[in-house]
Amino acid sequence: METKGRVLITDKVDDLLIQGLLQLGYECDFRAFISQEEVDRIIHQFTGIIITTKTTLFKSTLENAIGLKWIARAGSGMEIVDVEFAKSKNIACINSPEGNRNSVGEHALALLLALTHNIVRSSKQTEKLNWQVEENRVNELEGMTIGIIGYGNTGSAFAEKLKMFGVSVLAYDKYKSGFGNEFVKECEMKDLFNQCEAVSLHVPLTDETFHLANWNFFQQFKNNIYFINTSRGKVVETPCLLQAIKDNKVIGAGLDVLENENFSSLSSIELVIIEALIQTNKTIFTPHVAGKSFYTRKKFAEVLLSKISSLE
């Protein structure tokens, strides 16, 4: 079989993806520990490139990609790719949000249940032989109105998980309509602000969504809310979230993502804010693992192979 070109794979992927690319006729150059500088230096040699999160493909890199025909993101967020510039060079850009939708949906639900049932706080207290019952009475989900902002793969997966809990689900998506059903009601943001007792973010990071959850956002909620973010850290203006928690506008927050996830580079102000969030005892943190189950690499591989083959 005549080769269709070389593919640079810049991080660990499921073997299924490599084998599938070989069967499609590509040569694979697997460099799991490649640096950004080396990507910039050698990208002109490749027909395709597969990235996760550590490699960025902005204009300065893509200007050197003279033979590149496609970019494949093993994951969902495309903020690490200059998609518009890539398209101007006739480079196809694909991602695989279908691959971790279930994992993210489950994780968002887990965070919500952990908050409403005081799982983390009461566990830490009990480990210290501090038996606190009244302080840890739980809130049941049944009867709650839960809002979803962004009704793509993960937002709809979260909604599916909520079906069994006897809740009302409102969903807002600026770019989608016609997705309402007997369980999920399409709404405007004002409806979320007026009715919701919990809200979960499922949006990409764009210029529009940067600091979407700011001071004005939290102040518009009629009810005090539980707040979940499994999307991107910079969608939330963290100091505003901290103040909303202090003001009891946010009863509890479950955060899988942070504005700065490189703890070695935290500024003194960022460190103070994170420590203050911890001290509230109303925040649960997880290290951006919502979409990283033991199965997602294989699912990413399946989705990407299907999309790459359809490019031909």
Image (cartoon, rainbow, N blue to C red):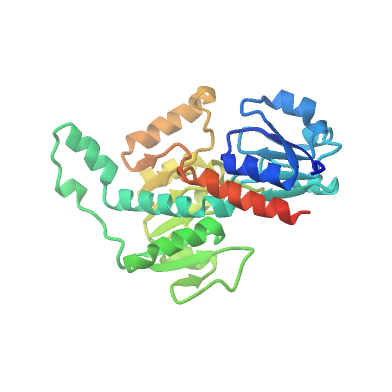
Quadrant position of residue 246: top left
Q: Position of residue 278 (x, y in %)?
A: 36, 35
Q: Position of residue 47 (x, y in %)?
A: 79, 40
Q: Is residue 218 above or below residue 61?
A: below
Q: Position of residue 3 (x, y in %)?
A: 80, 41
Query: Quadrant where the C terminus lies?
Result: bottom right
Query: Quadrant where the N terminus lies?
Result: top right
Q: Nearer the viewer, residue 197 or 181?
A: 181
**Is residue 236 among what the camera can see?**
no
At x 56%, y 46%, the residue is 235
Left or right: residue 295 compared with residue 1: left
Left or right: residue 15 compared with residue 148: right
Q: Position of residue 42 (x, y in %)?
A: 78, 27
Left or right: residue 195 compared with residue 115: right
Task: Farthest residue to the bottom: give it.
Answer: 182
At x 58%, y 39%, the residue is 15
Q: Is residue 96 above or below residue 277?
A: below
Q: Nearer the viewer, residue 87 or 68?
A: 68
Q: Is residue 10 above or below residue 223?
A: above
Quadrant position of residue 139: bottom left
Q: Nearer the viewer, residue 114 or 161?
A: 161
**Is residue 287 among what the camera can see?**
yes
Q: Is residue 125 above or below residue 149?
A: above
At x 44%, y 33%, the residue is 273
> How many marks can you see?
0
